[in-house]
Image (cartoon, rainbow, N blue to C red):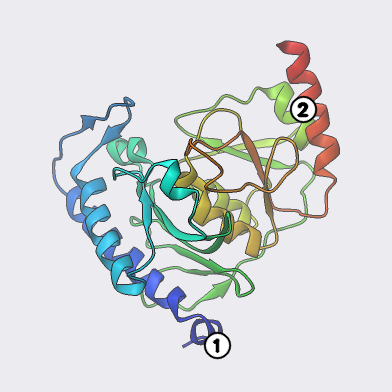
Amino acid sequence: MSDWMTAEPRLRLLAALARQAGAAILEVYARPFEVHEKADHSPVTAADLAAQTVIVAGLQAIAPALPVVSEEAVNADWEQRRHWSSYWLVDPLDGTREFVKRNGEFTVNIALIENHQPLLGVVLAPVTGALYLAGRGFGAWTQSGPEGSWMPLRSRPLARPATVTGSRSYERAQPAELEQVAGAGYASMAMGSSLKFCLIADGQADIYLRLGATSEWDTAAAQCVLEEAGGAVLDLSGQRLRYNRGLSLINPEFIAVGDGGVDWDARLRNLRRIRGAEA
């Protein structure tokens, strides 16, 4: 067992739990399934619910006292959540639209939040078996399959031209906006779910600019992975993305980057300037 797993045994348990949830998802993926529409008009399938059941039971075994916030649950209201210092934040199947399209670009996301920041995070791509795991102070790691060796993740210095990754199903950033943060001549790479963050953590891309709504469970686990790989996830004012901020579980717009040494504040000021001019 790796030294970092010995020092933080919850990482090993979360990796195993994510793989169990992934197996439950793939059982549904392998057969015909129905797609239902939730109140917010987003899709849900039996795979989302099966993974939810596996993850909640597993987290209760790991830390029975910690509450869970999940996309597929009725979550505690702000009057309860405002008093939480630690809790689990889960998306049992991130990228349900990609799951329905059967393109493989969906993930299991599990994060431990402590004092508004991700402390532990795991992201699993069930179809490929790739797992991304991180803990604050323990680095970021990837494993190609259940029997694979753990390899360290490290984001790269900003490439010139930069590679920008974006959503396959939702893309609102315009070329002029992307140029403010990525520079001219950037290359584009579409990807579903939280795999966009993992591409950056693995040095395959540089920037993910998200203009439009996401939920907190969409980003927390992957933020932990990217930060421990050397990157950052910032709101458009340049502040680190935070969790359990208030009544809403919707994130502010943000940028995920691999090179923490760049003056992102200046680039974000330029972005805010042109967006203000367009308003």
Is 166 placed above or below 124 here?
A: above
Identify the element where label 1 is drawn.
helix
Q: Position of residue 16 (x, y in %)?
A: 34, 72
Please indicate whether residue 194 sits to the left or right of residue 28 in the image: right
Numbered circle sitting on residue 155: none
Please indicate whether residue 60 sits to the left or right of residue 144 in the image: left
Q: Position of residue 24 (x, y in %)?
A: 22, 58
Q: In terms of sequence position, does the residue under pointer 1 or pointer 2 come before the other?
A: 1
Choose between 162 and 244: the one closer to the eye: 244
Kind of residue at badge 1: Asp
Task: Report the residue at 57% width, 50% height from top.
Answer: 197
Q: Which residue carries the number 2 mark?
A: 271
Where residue 22 sits, quadrant-wise, is bottom left
Q: Which residue carries the number 1 mark?
A: 3
Choose between 258 and 79: the one closer to the eye: 79
Is 106 placed above or below 35 here?
A: below
Is 140 placed above or below 89 here?
A: below
Choose between 145 and 52: the one closer to the eye: 52
Q: Position of residue 193 (x, y in %)?
A: 45, 43
Asked whether residue 182 appears in the rendered view, the answer is: yes
Please indicate whether residue 144 sits to the left or right of residue 156 in the image: left
Label 1: few (<14), some or many (≥20) within 10 Å? few
Distance Cα–Cα, label 1 vs label 2: 42 Å
Q: Which image quarter holds the C terminus?
A: top right
Asked whether residue 208 appears in the rendered view, the answer is: no
Kind of residue at badge 2: Leu
Is 116 placed above or below 20 here?
A: above
Q: Position of residue 101 (x, y in %)?
A: 31, 35
Kindly check if marks 1 and 2 are in contact, taking CB atoms under 8 A apart as contact: no
Identify the element where label 2 is drawn.
helix
Task: Report the residue at 47% width, 39% height from top.
Answer: 249
Task: Report the residue at 72% width, 58% height from top.
Answer: 156
